[in-house]
Image (tube, helix red, strand yellow):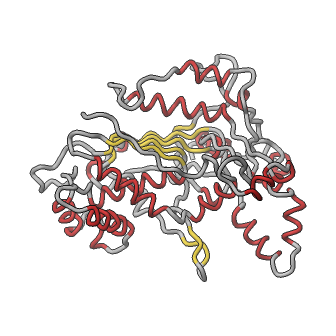
């Protein structure tokens, strides 16, 4: 295998505001360009048999790499050969359109898609009629942090409202060998419904679930805890407007939403261990000190963040509750503000569909971390009571774990 190459696609989180976190996560206006850009990078650098692809993504980034894997499943990885830059760009954009298409002729198993792969792409696993077909999946490892949008990423469309474009399907294709996804137990935003990973069990290769190579684990914390995302409503510093910088310096409008670093480190530890399991030659990660992560989790000055802020998010908004009330009472505007607020911040507990799901037991001490204290204690996650008024005042009101545990014990 040749040397390492890598590319990071900037998404929501670094230098972003909470409004970016919500609105970009919902509209995903540039999702197509991100998918095309990531796919183009692979086309520019991939050589069959010489490289393997490792992909990682959080939230919308996880959505993006799953789309890119779908593009590869549909059309393969285009060979550069004698194609011009313009021709490669046109083909990469067409690959995205084919992937998004709902026409049967564009489905991965159609004769036309197979002809596309055979004509311009590297040999693809599953194309058995190709004598050169590789038996190795091009994507060795996919690391996902809470892919959001069980129907895909919704977007606002004039005259229509929320439109849900969706994945081609929600199954991870055979071009991906190993999938690891960390999913949030405590997030409650309706528009951030998680998209779980699966395989197409109707295909012979995936008839036995034990051979799916999908490792999906539910971890305590909200969506932004797992991703260690820290937000302000307004930014300050280099590269922002003077008005935004001034507003950010006023305490009333610049309250920061802090993630729970204990929970972020718990997920980081799991993902790094998962990578090392499949990276025997340390090509992806040369080394990491698990003890350093554990020490941060156990530290006396560990940072446990703000918890689930969704039910009192207005306290973090410009001028807090006062600002929201001003907008709500403006003539001709108030009803729209109320409708948008209710849509964006509709809350409900997440649903764990499998009774045998891999759910991290944060209420019991983890022998790898501490023999005395549980993650619940270390991360400041209080027990819920089932009394809504009381639970809503707690740092993490979600009862997803309680519901799943009850169903499991009752064998429902």
Q: How many marks?
A: 0
**Looking at the image, is 263 positioned above or below residue 171?**
above
Residue ID at (87%, 76%)? 330
Q: Is residue 191 visible?
A: yes
Q: Quadrant of residue 320?
A: bottom right
Nearest the camera: 81 or 154? Answer: 81
Nearest the camera: 274 or 374? Answer: 274
Q: Is residue 312 visible?
A: no
Nearest the camera: 215 or 3? Answer: 3
Q: Quadrant of residue 23?
A: bottom right
**Looking at the image, is 242 positioned above or below residue 332?**
above
Taking 51 as reference, is 390 left or right?
right
Residue ID at (25%, 57%)? 78
Q: Position of residue 313 (x, y in %)?
A: 78, 54
Residue ID at (80%, 55%)? 247
**Looking at the image, is 349 positioned above or below residue 324?**
above
Taking 188 as reference, is 248 left or right?
right
Taking 44 as reference, is 48 left or right?
left
Q: From the image, which quarter does the N terminus lie in?
A: top left
Q: Position of residue 84 (x, y in %)?
A: 23, 62
**Looking at the image, is 323 positioned above or below residue 183?**
below
Q: Position of residue 371 (x, y in %)?
A: 64, 16
Q: Quadrant of residue 244?
A: bottom right
């Amino acid at each position: 295998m040749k040397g390492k190459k890598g590319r990071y696609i900037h998404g929501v989180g670094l230098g972003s505001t909470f409004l970016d976190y919500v609105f970009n996560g919902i509209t995903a206006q540039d999702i197509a360009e991100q998918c095309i850009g990531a796919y183009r990078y692979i086309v520019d650098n991939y050589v069959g048999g010489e490289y393997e692809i490792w992909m990682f993504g959080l939230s919308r980034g996880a959505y993006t790499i799953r789309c890119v894997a779908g593009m590869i499943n549909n059309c393969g990885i285009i060979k550069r050969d004698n194609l011009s830059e313009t021709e490669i760009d046109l083909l990469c954009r067409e690959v995205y359109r084919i992937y998004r298409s709902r026409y049967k002729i564009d489905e991965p198993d159609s004769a036309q898609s197979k002809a596309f792969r055979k004509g311009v792409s590297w040999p693809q696993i599953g194309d058995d009629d190709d004598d050169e077909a590789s038996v190795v999946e091009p994507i060795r490892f996919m690391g996902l942090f809470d892919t959001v949008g069980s129907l895909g990423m919704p977007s606002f469309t004039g005259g229509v409202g929320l439109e849900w474009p969706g994945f081609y399907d929600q199954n991870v294709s055979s071009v991906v060998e190993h999938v690891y996804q960390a999913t949030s137990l405590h997030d409650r935003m309706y528009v951030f419904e998680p998209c779980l990973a699966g395989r197409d069990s109707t295909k012979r290769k995936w008839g036995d679930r034990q051979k799916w190579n999908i490792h999906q684990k539910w971890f305590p914390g909200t969506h932004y805890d797992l991703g260690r995302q820290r937000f302000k409503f307004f930014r300050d510093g280099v590269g922002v407007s003077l008005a935004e910088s001034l507003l950010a310096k006023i305490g009333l409008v610049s309250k920061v939403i802090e993630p729970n670093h204990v929970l972020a480190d718990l997920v980081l530890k799991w993902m790094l261990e998962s990578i090392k399991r499949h990276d025997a030659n340390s090509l992806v990660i040369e080394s990491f000190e698990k003890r350093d992560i554990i020490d941060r989790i156990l530290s006396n000055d560990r940072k446990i963040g703000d918890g689930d802020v969704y039910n009192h998010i207005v306290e973090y908004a410009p001028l807090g509750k006062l600002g929201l009330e001003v907008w709500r009472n403006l003539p001709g505007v108030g009803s729209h503000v109320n409708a948008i607020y209710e849509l964006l911040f509709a809350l409900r507990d997440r649903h764990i569909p499998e009774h045998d799901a891999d759910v991290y037991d944060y209420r019991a001490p983890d022998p790898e971390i501490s023999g005395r204290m549980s993650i619940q204690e270390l991360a400041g996650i209080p027990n819920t009571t089932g009394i809504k008024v009381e639970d809503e005042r707690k740092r993490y009101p979600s009862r997803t774990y309680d519901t799943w545990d009850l169903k499991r014990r009752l064998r429902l």
